[in-house]
Image (cartoon, helix red, strand yellow):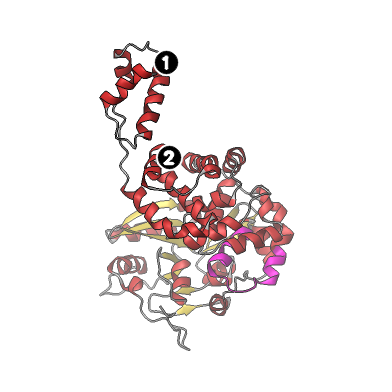
């Protein structure tokens, strides 16, 4: 899809997402009046990713809106229009509106009062220039009025279209205000960058890399996973290594070779699987890294399972081997492992689709023998039952899951 063109008057043609009934309901509510009547003149604008993506022809997902109204007024206006209002981050000026089942994040214009590199004390303002000045990158200072007028105080449109991620004003000052912006620079370069990165930005990131350990692990985790969701994150990860950034957040032996290959064969980015490709296949190291990043228990367990099983896993040689692997591993872990195995071996890429389809269709069979069956057969309750059950389960797997209850129990007499 070719990017929408902006005319000399700095306007953007109407977009499906700006004209949808859900969006119009929110805009009309915030503007202070119905679509077919007068409004109170509130200058409401679209901001963030929806504006960036629309300007370069990418699909728009989340819709963020900014307004000079304070959060309490935003809530009043939304509720008066019959829309649900959720105070998701009201102390920072953020309210989520729900219109026709779709969420819209609405934030009051802000200016920084005090910053310490981790947290900012903000004050609300009605000055769009003040709000734009506190943004991290020029492409994030662009805003869009509902009538299509583009506001670009930081000359962000040329940067956006050139694939140049550039800090607003002085890069060192922006990073000093919030060190997380250092990681955001690499994340945005992974998603929007083209060619060599902005030299001033890179130099500032290098100078401040040693401040990253002072950030909360949760904030680092969010940025890292968003970076790994980029189409081709490996080159940017290598850039981070060269700039002395990667070693501040991941083990020194994290490698990008497997990550680069995996990124080319996935149907859709999977940040956790990509993190597994980036980390060494060592359950202990992976567990430590997951803890340092404050990953969820599910994410940690998934990474550790991949690290434990990946070194000895090969793509199944036939249907029988595939069924055995699926039974032992389960479909989710099997899918992760076949992705990584195919990434390691280019010859296995052709088999990936079939392996994933088999995993999707897999229905785990149930062992036809229970522990009570073994007790009834004369095995004493206790560890012996578990050991015998495991032996029978292995025989059942070796039979390609065809041995029935009678066959398995009769084999007890032969052991």
Residue 183 colored magenta?
Answer: yes
Mark 1 Cα shell of 10 Å, populated few (<14), some (14-19), many (≥20): few
Task: From the image, give the main secondary structure of the stretch colored magenta.
Answer: helix
Q: Quadrant of the N terminus?
A: bottom left
Q: Which of 356/55 is in front? A: 356
Mark 1–mark 2 distance (CA, rounded to whole Å): 25 Å
Question: Crowding near pointer 2: few (<14 within 10 Å), some, many (20+)?
Answer: some
Quadrant the C terminus occupies: top left
Q: Quadrant of residue 352?
A: bottom left
Residue at left 61%, top 39%? 288
In the image: residue 365, left or right of residue 46: left
Residue 350 placement (x, y as % from top left): 43, 60
SS at circle 1:
helix
Q: Earlier in the sequence, mark 1 or mark 2?
A: 2
| Residue 384: mark | 1
Q: Secondary structure at mark 2?
A: helix
Q: Residue at x 56, y 57 (%)?
A: 259
> What span is colored magenta in the figure?
182-204
């Amino acid at each position: 899809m070719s990017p929408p063109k902006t005319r000399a008057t700095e306007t953007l043609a109407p977009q499906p997402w700006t004209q949808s009934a859900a969006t119009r309901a929110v805009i009309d509510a915030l503007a202070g009046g119905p679509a077919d009547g007068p409004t109170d003149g509130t200058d409401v604008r679209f901001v963030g990713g929806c504006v960036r993506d629309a300007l370069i022809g990418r699909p728009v997902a989340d819709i963020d809106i900014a307004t000079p109204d304070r959060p309490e007024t935003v809530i009043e206006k939304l509720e008066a229009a019959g829309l649900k209002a959720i105070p998701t981050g009201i102390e920072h000026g953020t309210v989520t509106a729900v219109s026709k089942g779709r969420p819209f994040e609405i934030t009051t214009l802000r200016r920084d009062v005090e910053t310490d590199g981790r947290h900012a004390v903000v004050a609300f303002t009605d000055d769009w220039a003040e709000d734009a000045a506190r943004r991290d990158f020029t492409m994030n200072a662009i805003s869009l009025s509902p009538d299509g007028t583009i506001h670009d105080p930081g000359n962000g449109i040329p940067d956006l279209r050139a694939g140049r991620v550039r800090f607003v004003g002085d890069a060192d000052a922006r990073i000093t205000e919030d060190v997380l912006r250092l990681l955001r620079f690499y994340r945005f370069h992974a998603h929007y960058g083209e060619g060599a990165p902005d030299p001033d930005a890179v130099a500032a990131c290098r100078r401040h890399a040693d401040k990253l350990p002072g950030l909360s692990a949760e904030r680092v985790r969010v940025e890292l996973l968003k970076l790994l969701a980029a189409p081709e994150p490996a080159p940017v990860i290598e850039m981070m290594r060269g700039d002395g950034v990667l070693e501040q957040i991941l083990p020194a032996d994290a490698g990008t070779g497997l990550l680069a290959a995996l990124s080319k064969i996935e149907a859709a980015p999977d940040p956790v699987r990509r993190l597994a490709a980036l980390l060494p296949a060592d359950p202990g190291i992976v567990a430590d890294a997951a803890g340092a990043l404050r990953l969820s228990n599910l994410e940690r367990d998934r990474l550790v399972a991949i690290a434990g099983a990946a070194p000895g896993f090969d793509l199944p040689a036939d249907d029988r081997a595939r069924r055995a692997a699926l039974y032992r591993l389960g479909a989710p872990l099997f899918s992760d492992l076949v992705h990584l195995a195919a990434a390691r071996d280019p010859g296995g890429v052709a088999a990936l689709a079939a392996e994933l389809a088999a995993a999707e269709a897999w229905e785990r069979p149930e062992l036809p023998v229970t522990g009570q069956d073994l007790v009834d057969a004369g095995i004493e309750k206790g560890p012996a039952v578990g050991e015998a059950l495991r032996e029978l389960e292995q025989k059942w797997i070796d039979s390609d899951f065809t041995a029935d209850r009678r066959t398995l129990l009769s084999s007890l007499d032969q052991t």
